[in-house]
Amino acid sequence: MPRSSRIDFDRVATDLRKHLRNGVSIASEACKYLAISQSTFSRVVTRLTDELLIVGCASKTRYALRRTIPDVGSQCPVYRIDEQGKTSKFGTLHAIHSRGFYYESSLDAKGKSRFFPDFPYFLDDLRPSGFLGRLIPRQHLKLDLPKRIDDWTASDCLKYLIRFGHDLIGDLILGDEAFQRYLDANRGGPHFISRDERSEEYPKRAIDVLKFGDPGSSAGGEQPKFSAIVGPELTPVLVKFSPKIEDNVSRRHADLLVCEHISLDVARRAGHPAAESELVQGENQVFLEVQRFDRTGIRGRRGLASLRVLDAEFVGNGKTWAEISQGLLKQRIIDEDAYRDIRWREWFGHLIGNTDMHPANMSFYFQLPCVVGLAPVYDMLPMLYAPQNDQIIEREFRPPLPKPDDAEIWRSAWTAGCEFWTAVSNDARISTAFRQTARENLEHLRSIEGLRELLP
């Protein structure tokens, strides 16, 4: 009998790498692609153990080719800080080909360990963004990352996060170096600014954050900000600030910060959780101090997931708050109370001229893999009137008309909208011109009060 041809295992191994560079595979798919038997496949896998990530068992076993990210490696630990400030090993993030990841959870809970074609959705809010995010490439030149954070890949993000991501949104820290920075930052207790010193210290912080230059405008006209800890209570805050008030444009920026403070107070009094805020003035600037609702006590943290990432992972709508949330409700990711609150917030935003209600401006408390509650209202202000290209543009306030299904929510939001414009029109911290705008908008809302009786 003729002897069977000898198998070239080096060639088969090369072909298997090529196959797995396209993504995760099961054994039967790989055997068909390579035209080999299951036993031959098993022998090749044994040779490539160090290069492969093998997950599952029996016929459900999946195989992936490990990927090494420059200056990161092929995997990094993920740590979680809970609401009491206790730290735990939350999981391990493995990089695989082609651009994907496998999140290996340290917790035995269904749906936590899984493959992702790109950055896992529950980490995506950690990507640098906004005013502070755009400063990062200038602050960390040695990382040699693209100057535009919008051009960053998941690998670029990890290169930054595992070194400097010790105080990010939510409750997670990626990598040992970032965790060491977290420990260093808490050595001997965090540095804080006393309440009596804020009017002097906040202008200095504003200058420091602007030393890196104008980071460029964003689509949402985002306000410059910095983070701080206010004492002696050691309250973590984000502080938005206006330019020095020297002309109509800088005055408008200051007006809008006061408006945001008022809107949060109105929403809270209407029965909707809202971020706690306080106004501080110093060096002819207005500072809006907003307490971080992803922090608890001195060191505790709470997980967050924005509507943006939940939409991308579960719905794929990309439209309004209510439309995305309806998709989440249908999948039982959020409950009826959260959906109703989101609809109220959206109507309140319409009735105060908020034209910047994008999905990143709505967040949920999150514990992988579950939404555990709706986070407070934030970034709620009349962005219709934000300066554009350093100019004040005349805008017409025309909120949309409600639909029959919105009747009860619209009535409540309309009342809150009237309360908002009344407060703005009477607030001495706001310019005379914008108080007049507020009075006109209040009259506009009052003119449609009759809709309350027409709705079912």
Image (tube, rainbow, N blue to C red):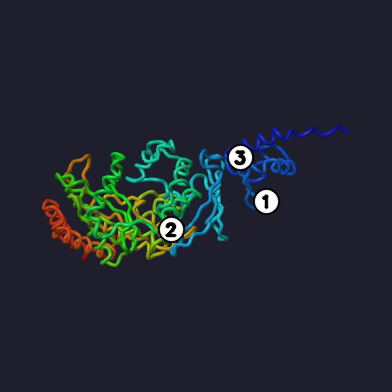
Amino acid at the residue labelled 2: Gly
Please report the residue visible at 46 percent of the width from the left and 46 percent of the height from the top: 163
Q: Quadrant of residue 446?
A: bottom left
Amino acid at the residue labelled 3: Leu
Q: How far apart are marks 1 and 3 (CA)?
A: 17 Å
Q: What x and y, as percent, mark residue 390? A: 20, 40
Query: Against 229, is 41 above or below?
Result: above
Q: What element carries label 1?
A: helix
- Upstream in the sequence, badge 1 or badge 2? 1
Quadrant placement of the N terminus: top right
> In this figure, which residue is indicated by the disc labeled 3?
20
Q: Do the residues labelled 1 and 2 touch (CB within 8 Å)?
A: no
Task: Tell me if 171 is positioned left or right of 347 in this view.
Answer: right
Which mark identifies residue 303?
Answer: 2
Amino acid at the residue labelled 1: Ser
Residue extending farthest front: 188
**Mark 3: few, some, or many residues within 10 Å (few <14, many ≥20)?**
many
Please report the residue visible at 38 percent of the width from the left and 36 percent of the height from the top: 147
Q: What element carries label 3?
A: helix
